[in-house]
Amino acid sequence: MNVQSNKYIYTYSIILISIVAVVLTLVSVALKPFQEENRRIEKMLSILYSINVQTKKETVANDYKRYIVNSFVVDSKGEIVKNKVAFEINVEEENKKPFNKRMLPVYVAEVNNEKKYIIALYGKGLWGPIWGFLSLNNDFNTVYGCYFDHKGETPGLGAEIATFEFQKQFKNKKLFDEQKNFVGIKTVKGGADKNNPHEVDAISGGTITSDCLTKMLFDGIKNYIGFLKKGNNYGK
């Protein structure tokens, strides 16, 4: 065969592309279990970080079993949905559904003999998705802790949402006002009023990401209003 001919070049290219495609497929299939395990570990880490439990990949499974004492799924009305596993719920996919069709995971932790209720959040950042977990005291109103992460926010600016210094501001903030109206928590550019239980400082130089986080918090917590109000009733 004439190696300079177009036929030879086309044939060679097709064979090479086919081999590469097969190899990539085999590698992808082989790595899938490891990728899924890494996602599982990262999720457990994030949930534990939201209740201020600092752990690491090697011990996260044991710590998760130690602190997370229950989990379940609720609908938009706050009713428990049977035959659904909280850890398997994809919050990103649920957010694409109509509000009344969403499945919402809830994790129950026990810290110092007190129950904490953890809800999952997901939204859009400046350059990609942002997400997180918010833990609440058993009044279903006061924030105990939180953990936020991102896919592509700017290092030193928007990416600061994933830092302890930013996240620690949320402790003891409130979701409802004294009349039990939902207010949420917002980031405030230029500095929050320290006496306002619904405000935290925005990220310096990360205004857009801060605004995106505020929207994620409002929309994400609003998903759980039915559950939170039922929780308040149970707590009376």
Image: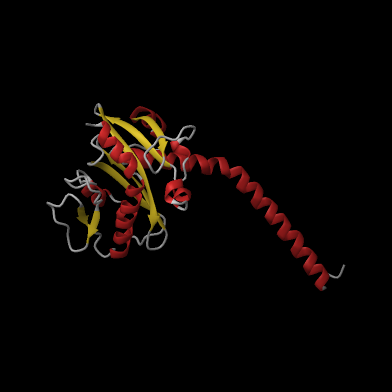
Residue at the farthest right position: 1
Looking at the image, residue 154 lies above or below residue 98? below
In depth, the one of 235 and 196 nearer the eye is 235
Q: Position of residue 110 (x, y in %)?
A: 29, 29
Look at the image and tell me in which quarter the N terminus lies: bottom right
**Image side of residue 145 versus residue 101, left or right:** left
Look at the image and tell me in which quarter the C terminus lies: top left
Residue at screen point 39% across, 55% down: 123
Looking at the image, residue 112 lies above or below residue 103? above
Looking at the image, residue 108 lies above or below residue 185? above
In depth, the one of 105 and 43 nearer the eye is 105
Residue at screen point 26% across, 42% down: 145
In depth, the one of 1 and 56 nearer the eye is 56
**Is residue 172 visible to the viewer in this orientation of the structure?**
yes
Q: Where is residue 33 in the image (x, y as percent from the top left)?
A: 56, 40
Q: Position of residue 48 (x, y in %)?
A: 34, 38
